[in-house]
Image (cartoon, grey):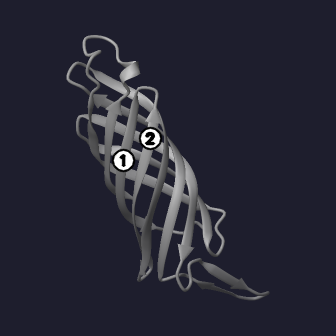
Amino acid sequence: MIGMANIGFTENQSTLQGENVQVAASGSVASIAGQIHYRFHTNERIAWFGQFTFPMMASQGSYLSGGGGIEYYWGKAPAKVTLRDATSSFTLLPVTRFFFSGGINMAYLAYLTETAQKNDTLLEIDIGGGISRKIGKYTIRASAGIARGVGVATTTMGMKAMVGGIFFLD
């Protein structure tokens, strides 16, 4: 998938060193981002997922994250179903699916202040949602979410919006 990631950060006052000890920096890192999202252990309404978000084009900094979580689907037919007997099989693919997701990520943030370039490692909790729609033999997925991150030197609030394609491995 491809989309946008915008991460706002504020430095923790207790971690400041050097010339800017009195002033905690704040700002944001925005980027055109790519995301690899893999769903596994899928049943009718719930799927576990792993994902990795990486910068493709970034402003004054960089943001990487990776983690996993769970998606909950709703709608008339939210899951791919395959019926098999001894001689044939029949597969039903959902046309439209809506989902809500929650997860935990580890993230790396590199950012620029007035005095230095700095970085931090974060633990993020994210929530989001989206839709996937089958068009012909392709499936398009759109998702958006927010993430709250806490690191050693910073606290963050991020927003991500992604659009991409889905293909089934089986």
Q: Disc 1 designates what residue?
A: 158
Q: Quadrant of the N terminus?
A: bottom left
Question: Is residue 95 found left or right of 113 in the rendered image?
Answer: right
The residue lying at 59 percent from left, 77 percent from top is 79
Q: Position of residue 63 (x, y in %)?
A: 37, 39
* Residue toward you, 80 or 12: 12
CB under 8 Å between discs 2 and 1: yes
Per the image, label 2 sits on a secondary structure element best described as strand
Secondary structure found at label 1: strand
The amino acid type of the residue labelled 1 equals Gly
Residue 52 x %, y %: 47, 48
Residue at the extreme right of the image, as rendered: 86
**Residue name at image x 40 percent, y 53 percent:** 146
For marks 2 and 1 on the same chain, the one whose residue lies earlier in the sequence: 2
What is the x, y in percent for residue 109? 38, 34
User: Residue most toward the left?
Assistant: 114
Amino acid on which disc 2 is placed? Gly
**Could you tell me residue 4's position as x and y percent?**
30, 53
Label disc, if present, on residue 66 of the rendered structure? none
Identify the image quadrant of the C terminus: bottom right
